[in-house]
Amino acid sequence: MDNDKVSLHKPTALAEEFMKIPKKERGAINFLAVATFFLLITPLLSMHRVIDFMIFCIFAMSFDLLYGYMGRLSFGQMLYLGTGAYICGLFVKYVNGNPLLAIFFGIAFAGLLAMLLGLIIVRTTGACFALINLAFNHIGFFLVLSPLRPITRGEDGFGVIASKLGFLNLGSRPIMFVFVLLCLLIVFYFLRQLTSSPYGILIRSIKEDETRVRFVGYNTFFYKWLTFVIAGAIAGLAGSLTALNYNYVNPNSMDVHANVGVVFACLIGGAGHLYGALVGGVIYMVISNFLAYYIYRWEMFLGFSLLLIVFRFRMGVWGYIQRLWEYLATRKGALKFMKKEAI
Amino acid sequence: MLQIKNIDVAYGHAKVLHDVSLDIEKGQMAFLIGRNGAGKTTLLKTVIGLLKPQMGSIIYEGKEISNLPPEEHYLKGLRYVGQEKKVFGNLTVRENIELAAFASREPIDTSLEKVISIYPKIKDFLKTKAGQLSGGQRQILLVGRALVGDPKLLLIDEPTQGLAAIVIEEVVNILSRLKEQVSAVIVEKNLAMVTRLADKIYILKEGKVAKEIRNKSEISDIKGLEEYL
């Protein structure tokens, strides 16, 4: 095969080789890759930070499902993260210290809130969608800050100490690390299955042209709503893990301004790819955690980065990694290395 | 099969269709011809549920459908192929077909077979992004996708617009083979195609049905039909 004349219409040789691997094994390779990545960066960054990174990546994946796959930009995804955090924390504080139950209720309430608000929100598109989410996030923030103060303790917040559950002691950092990594892998697996199924094709089509999807027989309202609920529930998981990780919940869990972070993460990493959400999540967290040591107004750096991405590098880091991979795959040397043939 | 009775359709205050009536029987291939702005595309969009008639009714298989949303029309067997040849460009050809298969609850292999049977060359492009297809390939993909599930009536808007002659011939051959399988209402300006395939022709003029032609000899009279374009 003459690699220099590989048609744009055909998948690259490396992609073809990869696709020959049975699906289950490909899935396992993906998991190993994700787990290995986070394990590798732990010695460099510290376990505590990597736990933060992983929780943020879960949140980024929830946002990417809405924005990258379905094309709906939300400025209020923190509402669901915050809901998960508060419900998890309140459950542990007032009902039962069982962390798994607390996480379950955190996810359930976040999902339920998304179900109710989604009935209104997904009727909108574009700027309306973005801003109505922002509005609800503001409302949620205000609620936990003031009217619900007797329960949530307002801006003081409250401590969250979960009980041990057999060997599951989330107070131990290594166990917390493994637990969060497992949650990340489960979310990654779930979203990977979802986005590579006909459902995934459908939401990508909605992103492209919703009217045409209706012509193909779909009630697009239902599928938009369902996606919104799933994204909200996953954000709730991220919130629950945040509460258990920090052993503390306060209104910052629902901070409206923090929505910017997840938007940046998906844009930096590459929207519409789960790996992009992961890569972008890590990059954003590295920038926000470490750059402040070196640059006084590090947020300005983010602003310039966003301009660069929007005007010049729209595919994001993962998009360009894919492109580079495909470029390398078309070169004779790369293919011969794969097939172990002499030149 | 499809009876359109005295419909008026407007965009805001601008009335586009006036008291339009059509009758399509099962197994018929009817063509709508007329000048630009006559209301042909508006008529198809109204039948498929994208527009609502201000007056009149649309009866399909004995049931009123004018108030149903487009997705319900699809599930009843109506298939719309628009003028713009818009495929889902970021999906592969296979995924475009899979989308329709999933909606129709039809196994993907069956759907692929249907599409490949009308255009075997599409097998080479299944993994290609649909946005990279040529205009003719997209048109054929759209017609093929419309055959997924259990289609009963195709509504096709200018299938040969912007296509090269050789591709037009391919499209005409495909539609000719489909005549035995489904009924169709086709908007078209290519009179050679119209005269070759039509069982009935409706001529639209300024939003009204100016003439209905059923007679074979009149259908074959291209010069006579040209006066209406």
Image (tube, coloured by chain):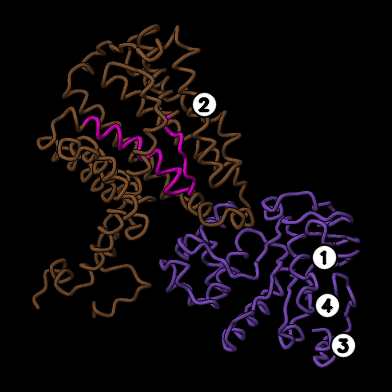
Tell if the residue under mark 2 belongs to the same chain as the one under mark 3.
no
Give the residues drawn in magenta, as a range: A51-78
Question: Few, some or many C-alpha atoms within 10 Å of disc 3 (few <14, some 14-19, many ≥20)?
Answer: some
Chain with colour brown in the figure? A
Q: Residues within 10 Å of mark 1 (few under 14, many from 20)?
A: some
Mark 3 residue element: helix
Dot 1: what SS? strand
Looking at the rendered structure, the secondary structure element under dot 2 is helix
Which residue matches tag 3?
A: B218
Measure the C-alpha gap from mark 1 to mark 2: 44 Å
Q: Could you tell me if the residues under marks 1 and 2 are in contact, i.e. CB atoms within 8 Å?
A: no
Q: In this figure, which residue is indicated by the disc labeled 2?
A: A113
Query: At numbered mark 4, what does the secondary structure look like: helix, strand or loop?
Result: strand
In this orientation, does residue A333 appear? yes
Q: Which residue is mark 1?
A: B16
Q: Name the amino acid type tagged 2.
A: Leu
